[in-house]
Image (tube, grey):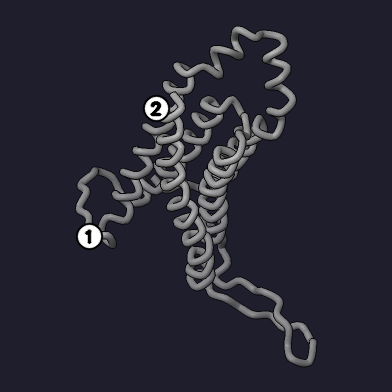
Amino acid sequence: MKIKFSTLILLTFVTVALLTPFVFSPWYLPMLRESNFDLHLILQGELYKQITGYVSLFFILIEMILVARKRGNSWKIKIKLPGSLLFWRSLHIFVGIALLGTTLIHTLGSQGLNFNAVFLWVFFGVVLSALMGSVAEVGILESPQRVFSFAGMKADGLNQNKFIPKGVLIRNLRLIWLNTHIFLVSAFVVMLIIHMIIAYYFQ
């Protein structure tokens, strides 16, 4: 299964829809508390947070297995799972969007405070860096162009075009977005462990 550019654009709109409640939560969460305090209490309660937190953790574990499957050869880890690399890469993207959905359910769109706020924004960075990188890469791959033109500047100030082959452009873009994504994922994993420790310490 090879993910298409049109599918990635659709997933981008889904991502925007899932991120929108985080923008408006400072307005609708107080309204929910005032209009239905009992429901608000349940949604902010320990049981709800634990169930939704474990569901999110389940998706994170799936993502880790998918990463190990994708990069097993370079890490010298032998994980035998059926399916092509393209299939597991596509699944990795879909599970990442699902994780964003479970995070919305877990937090109710609340942006959090202090550490939790930073943790949430790092997670957004993880999702957006992967999605933007994938959209750019697949868009270039599906393009009929073999070379891409970029305007440069000569020493005398006159414009000139620089032509970059498709493969070189993809490699250069991947160097930027994939390294950014890996850095953010590493920060996210560390912060996830701290988040779980804090959650159980104040239980």
Q: Where is residue 132 in the image (x, y as percent from the top left)?
A: 57, 52
Q: How far apart are marks 2 and 1 (CA)?
A: 30 Å
Tell me: residue 120, above or below residue 184: above
Tell me: residue 152, above or below residue 17: below
Q: Residues within 10 Å of mark 2 (few under 14, many from 20)?
A: few
- The residue lying at 46 percent from left, 27 percent from top is 202
Total numbered circles: 2
User: What is the three-letter code of the residue carrying label 2?
Assistant: Tyr
Question: What residue is shown with label 2?
Answer: 54
Q: Position of residue 159 (x, y in %)?
A: 76, 83
* Residue furthest right as drawn: 157
- The residue lying at 61 percent from left, 14 percent from top is 40
The one of 6 and 199 positioned closer to us in this rendering? 199
N-term mark: 2 or 1:
2
Tell me: residue 54, above or below residue 80: above
Question: What residue is shown with label 1?
Answer: 76
Name the side, left or right, on which 27 lies relative to 176.
Answer: right
* Residue furthest front as drawn: 201
Name the side, left or right, on which 96 lies relative to 62.
Answer: right
User: What is the three-letter code of the residue carrying label 1?
Assistant: Lys
